[in-house]
Image (tube, coloured by chain):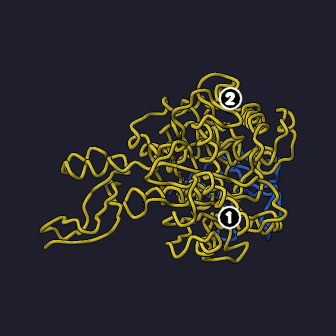
Chain colours: A blue, B yellow
Amino acid sequence: MPEDYRVVASTVVRVAPTGFAAPYVLAAVRTAGGLALGRIDVGPDDAPLPGTALESIGTQDGVAVYRPAPS
Amino acid sequence: VTHHVRAEHVLPRSGLAARAVDGDTLLDGCCDPVTVVRPIGPEVGALSALGERDREAMTAQNVYVTGTAMTPFGRAEHLDLLGLAVSAGRAAMVDAQITPSDVDAIYVGSFLAQSLQRQGVLASLVARELGLGPVPATALEGACASAGIALRHGLMACRAGMARTVLCLGVEQMSRHSVAEVTAGLSEALEATTDQSGGLTFAGFFGLVAQAHTARYGTTREQLSAVGVKNREHGASNQQAMFRKPLAADEIASSRLIADPLRLLDCSPIADGAAAAVVSVEPTDRSVRVLAAAQASGAVALRHVDDLTTFPATLAAAAAAYAEAGVGPDDVDVAEVHDCFSVAEIVDCEDLGLLPRGEAAGMVEAGTTSARTPGLVVNPSGGLLSRGHPVGATGLAQVHELVGQLRGTAPVQVPGAQVALAHNLGGCGASATVTLLGRA
């Protein structure tokens, strides 16, 4: 059974540090191991709301990347 | 075995400070050359194990803030990092009516001096420039809580009997550097291996806090804006504040998004500035008494966070401070809290027990913490949102404001203020200090 990932909170970072192309969506994701930072592979108008189920699609720069899980 | 030692040590489990001084004969037959003399943590009950002589020694050492000063916050055209520090330090000594030869030690807080100015050994440099002589000079870094930590270390030196008068100072020079350089420097207070590399920013972190607070308590856009409206109104009277123009709620709500839902005017501004306080075991007719000075640490990385709507470091520091002072949040008349972002003031007030959990946003919107209404006033200086946030100086600018409140000379004076609280937060809650002050 795949691990359950859920959005605790998300934000669209619109002013980014050097080396990052804003805007991008970050989330605090509830995982089996606790809270984790995740990149969400959606556009800035589609940032997922708290409680949204996610599926992992890999890692980027050492950070897990997710997208909303199919309902 | 008899130990003759001079040392200070914080017991890791009890949170109690321990002190042994020259000439004391302590702990015969014990392998640990430290004895408990003074509490700084919440477990005051442990004092019952102390002898009467130690308890008397512990309670006898009152410490006072005898002088404070700050430079105007904003863009300092003519003062560099050292110039800002020296300006605030000299003015604080004048306010305390002392000379450099009266100072036994100096503690200097700065977060970005090494990454932006490439300046180490800042404390020694400042001590030399101020003419303090060969006193111990110590630099401290705790991100945005650097000045609060510097103050606490100065107070500890006095309480430990290792100094009679200490200069505590915080300074930052940010505006001469590009936004990219400052952002990179500030990001050093985020955990490097995941949060920095993953593109998290401080605005991004507090954007997550705002959304989590909204999800749990229904915090609204209007309530976030109410924080900025109040603080700009307070700051309008503060000659040393960076922003003195009042703001309307719709101006804040329509400013550009930085990290949803936080907008530009929800964020404290990059600024230059310095603030300083003289602390001493000898009171003066203008001094205020230090009731408590507590510090705690907390999460550095997002993966260390259990709950985005609270900062455990603030909870721990507040509990320790209230226990040490023997007062509670209901006794606080005026507070300067760390509103680095609008949502932070709401969380701070809840963590400090100043407002009920989950109700702070509505109460700020209703004007409960405004100087316009009786009772508790939060951030009468204008807070970080109005005064500006030269990160390493903020904690002592808070104390400067509160000393004015207790002297009855603040620009936005809280009538009859007796107990004042300063709360300084570093990083994403990596460290927090809570200082309680009272009329001498």
In the image, residue B147 lies at what x, y percent?
Answer: 59, 58
**Chain bearing mark 1:** B
Dot 1, crowdedness within 10 Å: few (<14), some or many (≥20)? many
- Of labels 1 and 2, earlier in sequence is 1
Q: Is residue B120 visible?
A: yes
Numbered badge on residue B85: 1
In front of the other: B64 or B180:
B64
Q: Is residue B314 left or right of residue B212?
A: left
Q: Which residue is mark 2?
A: B370
Q: Is residue A51 visible?
A: no
In front of the other: B15 or B120:
B120
Q: CA distance from mark 1 to mark 2?
A: 32 Å
The secondary element bearing badge 1 is classed as: helix
Q: Residue at x 31, y 51 (%)?
A: B58
Q: Amino acid at mark 2?
A: Ser
Q: Residue at x 63, y 37 (%)?
A: B346
Numbered badge on residue A35: none
In the image, residue A7 lies at what x, y percent?
Answer: 64, 48
Q: Quadrant of the N terminus of chain B?
A: bottom left
Q: Residue at x 68, y 53 (%)?
A: B70
**Chain bearing mark 2:** B
In the image, residue B60 lies at what x, y percent?
Answer: 33, 48
Picture layout, residue B131 above or below residue B335: below
Camera-nearest label, 1 or 2: 1
Q: Amino acid at mark 1?
A: Ala
In the image, residue B280 lies at what x, y percent?
Answer: 47, 54
Tell me which corner region of the image, top left, top right, bottom left or bottom right, holds residue B81: bottom right
